[in-house]
Amino acid sequence: MNGSSQEDTHRTVERVARESYGRLVAYLSSHTRDVASAQDALSNALVSALTTWPRDGVPQNPEAWLLTTARHSFVDLVRHQQVAEASEPTLMLLRRDSAEMNLSLEFPDERLKLLFVCAHPAIDPAMHTPLMLQTVLGLDAARIAHAFLVSPATMGQRLVRAKTKIRDGGIQFEVPEERELPQRLDAVLEAIYAAFGIAWDDLAGVDQRGRDLSEEAIWLGRVLKELMRGEAEVRGLLALMLHCEARRRARRAPDGRYIPLSEQDPQQWSRSLIEEAECHLAEASGRRPAGRFQLEAAIQSVHAERARSGRTEWAAIMVFYERLMHISPTLGTRTGYAAAVGEANGPEAGLAVLDGIDPNDVSGYQPYWAVRAHLLQQLRKTSEAADAFDRAIGLAEDPAVRQFLLQRRG
Amino acid sequence: MQFALLIYHRPEEFGMRKNDYNDPHLGAWRAYYKALVEAGVYVGANALEVPETATTVRLREAKRSVQDGPFAETKEQLGGFIILELPSVDAALEWAARCPGASIGAVEVRPLAPEAMRRGFTG
């Protein structure tokens, strides 16, 4: 086999892995709850695809091939890992699955259950997102560790611990019942949003954490939308992420300088992503009351409107923030609300909102200080503004943002 | 729990260290220091002179050896350190990422040895 078609095969394996990873892991682990072994088995199957497919050709149904191969490997893994007696129920389940499997190449999509397992209340909330990225998308622990600013060894250990808890902690692979659903779904949405990482996209404050994972987060958002087409908040989250993503390029000048939202050139925004976001928002907006993600998406939608109208309707943004304050008065919401009030009703009004926040909550929260500095500067309170700028500069992680604030501070 | 942030500079960064109070480079460090103090995590810190000023001493088989320059000839050299009181290594990594030194050189995070051991050293 020549080099280029070997490359093609390699790419096919990569594509199938990307598209099918979560489906296969979810299906393989849905009965046994043994996510770690399912992942190991799938890794073995992918390795074997890389040697077999170039030789024998890509099978007609690559996903079914991977599933069959992974299942054989899974049985071996479980047999080796556990004391024979203890693993007997698992092996029985696997054998039963195999028997069913031979009847058809189709297998159910269990990814939704897997998403709910990853964001289960019994799992440490800090691990919800890493678990999703690893089990549904197949990202390696090192890459997740970088994005979450944790050492790769620590992230690896935490993932193993979380998966052991899934296997042994009685966590069921199921879609929660209606009564539980809103809260449980919220945890799933939060975890996806955390991967996206932009908690607040305005003025001078940009939370950079996880930005490398934005594409993966949008992918997860799309998967969830396919699996739960009727849920308005799912579309709200997807719309929010797409709106922010549409502005990614506009946030940096060609020389790498940071450009705040208010100074971005709307021509640089991606029209197709904005349109897609608007579609999801429109689809969601029929349902009342609007949830947190729909409101946040609506705020971003008002910002996007500037591409058409040339101006930002701060009063509208303020109204959305007011509704958001009722359902989700987080530090990010309150800071964003203060910024919107500052623009709509003047810097003094904005400052009054900031003064209502407990100072103990903000000692490490960069956007608060960036907004505070901005409002104080507008009021020409030079030395107070300089102090707030220093706090914002000192808490900034992105050197471009730091440089921008240093220049503003003067 | 106390952590040391060991700040490694590249040669050009040592070159940027001036004593001009209005130097923007210094401004970033000053702001970072302020944020540490205001967050209540600051224990102590200091900057080191440039590596060329270092002299390294060894005693081997009762023979003295004195070498010009730092212990190891690497591109990145220790430029200073900060000691922080923090609840976890996660928090220490977060502050390390915000350190102006992280975006040019590197910041190594290490827990201080347990206090009993440190007291053994210092009496």
Image (tube, coloured by chain):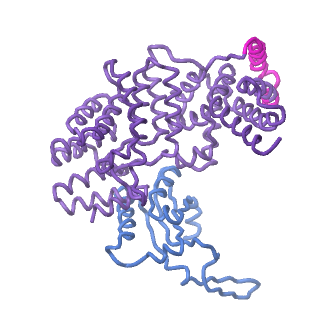
Q: Quadrant of residue A5?
A: top right
Q: Main secondary structure of the magenta part?
A: helix
Q: Residue at x 51, y 49 (%)?
A: B90
Q: Is residue A101 magenta?
A: yes
Q: Is residue B112 magenta?
A: no
Chain coloured purple in the rendered structure: A
Q: Residue at x 58, y 71 (%)?
A: B76
Residue A246 is situated, as x and y percent measured from the top left of the image, at 41, 40
Q: Nearer the viewer, residue A401 or B82?
A: A401
Tell me: B4 left or right of A358: right
Chain B, colour shown: blue
Q: Nearer the viewer, residue B91 or A329?
A: A329
Residue A35 is situated, as x and y percent measured from the top left of the image, at 66, 29
Tell me: A61 left or right of A386: right
Residue B3 vertical position relative to residue B62 in the rendered view, above or below: above
Q: Which stretch is magenta?
A: A77-104
Q: Residue at x 70, y 29 (%)?
A: A38
Q: Residue at x 25, y 53 (%)?
A: A374
Residue A295 is situated, as x and y percent measured from the top left of the image, at 32, 30
Quadrant holding the C terminus of chain B = bottom right
Q: Nearer the viewer, residue A360 or A347?
A: A347
Residue A374 vertical position relative to residue A120 in the rendered view, above or below: below
Residue A401 is situated, as x and y percent measured from the top left of the image, at 38, 56
Residue A307 vertical position relative to residue B13 in the rendered view, above or below: above
